[in-house]
Amino acid sequence: MSLEVSVEKSLGAFALNATFSCGAGITALFGQSGSGKTSVINMIAGLLRPERGRIAVDGRTLFDSATNTDVPPHRRRIGYVFQDARLFPHLTVRRNLLYGRYFSPTAGRYASFDQVIELLGIAALLERRPGGLSGGEKQRVAIGRALLANPRILLMDEPLASLDDARKGEILPYIERLRDQMGLPILFVSHAMDEVARLADTMVLMTGGSVAAVGNVEDLSARADLPLLARRQEAGAVVHARVASHDARYDLSELRFDGGTLRVPRVAQPVGGVIRLRILARDVSLSVRKPVGTSVLNVLPGRVSTLAVDEGPYAEVRVAVGSAALLARVTRLSAEELGLREGLEVYALVKSVALDRRGP
């Protein structure tokens, strides 16, 4: 399944012009508040009409200004999960879920009621009403209702924004299971990079109503030339790593990726499992010589690929480590004293405690 979007619309003084495409898995529509993310997904859902452009899901045209095509929202077969769950308060969880099934065509259903219940872990909630559910439980039910409508694509408009860290930690594994098991395109709106790094395969970066960049999360997250990403406090890189071993004595895990080996506080995945690891730029130090006598366990040889210096105190350095990349934020003074430049061989130092995934 695939999604193709090319839309234009004026919203008062705000001009929206967005073009991108995506396939199965999670695509993050990422940007600051007011960048046009929600307007784009509302156009896909048919809740907001573009002035010009085309929208197609799996080759089926939903909107095309050139041919005056505009499929009504209820015929688009699009699932929509809002920031707030919007469950019917007078219905049980079971009846809320079956309401979604009511709109699903019998032919071509790809998920049964029992499959969705198991996927989202909500069997124990079926006879309860929304008023007795936590925020994370409500969102899981809302996702289930959308899935049971048998959508061609699932839109999620900042579904974690109203949840505290504990509830986010509760629901994230279920969204990962949804990504890995359902095989349908999911457009996930967010302005939180930690959510994007953990969940998304592709990122569409929006700013000022336009698409600034489209690509896989690993590549875009480590690009120092994208100010919206590189200048943020949570700027960093995303790497895929495989669990090589667990050290029971020191409660550590060894992870291997193309750039080398990382030792981190023990992760829950078994040996052989693959995880996404987010390494913040502020947690990466650089050295032009291999350090000795240091408490830092992770020392990765690499090469400076880009160096971006702004007018403030910092410089953003992208370091190639194998085929992967890390982003380091250092002071301009440090950059000058180390003689950092493109092509220079360096060592990237990452403290293990900075890579602890056990918190929410």
Image (cartoon, rainbow, N blue to C red):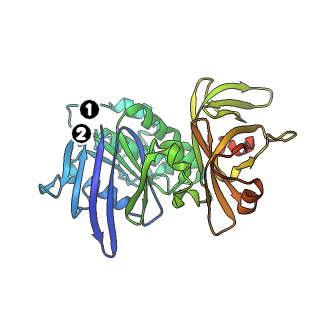
Q: Is residue 68 left or right of residue 242?
A: left
Q: Residue at x 28, y 40 (%)?
A: 152
Front residue of 195 and 214: 214
Q: Position of residue 194 (x, y in %)?
A: 56, 49
Identify the residue under disc 2: 104
| Callout 1: SS | loop
**In the image, is 224 to the left or to the right of 177?**
right
Q: Quadrant of residue 268?
A: top right
Residue 310 visible, this orientation: yes
Identify the mark nearer the N-term, 2 or 1.
2
Look at the image and tell me whether residue 171 can be seen. no
Q: Residue 35 in the image: state x and y as whole percent.
A: 42, 64
Q: Is residue 14 left or right of residue 345?
A: left
Q: Nearer the viewer, residue 125 or 344?
A: 344
Where is residue 86, by image quadrant?
bottom left
Q: Residue at x 68, y 42 (%)?
A: 355
Name the mark on residue 109.
1
Q: Residue furthest left?
A: 67
**In the image, what residue occupies the spot 84% across and 41% down?**
294
Residue 180: percent from left, percent from top: 44, 33
Q: Secondary structure at mark 2?
A: loop
At label 1, counting other C-alpha atoms closer than 10 Å, the crowd grade (few under 14, some 14-19, many 20 or more) is some
Separation (CA) of disc 2 from disc 1: 7 Å
Q: Nearer the viewer, residue 141 or 152?
A: 152
Location of residue 154 with respect to 66 vertically, above or below? above
User: Compared with residue 50, is residue 238 higher up or lower down, i.e. above or below?
Assistant: above
The image position of residue 245, as x and y in percent, is 69, 24
**Dots 2 and 1: beta carbons under 8 Å?**
yes
Q: Which amino acid type is marked by label 2?
A: Ser
Residue kind at label 1, given as amino acid type: Arg
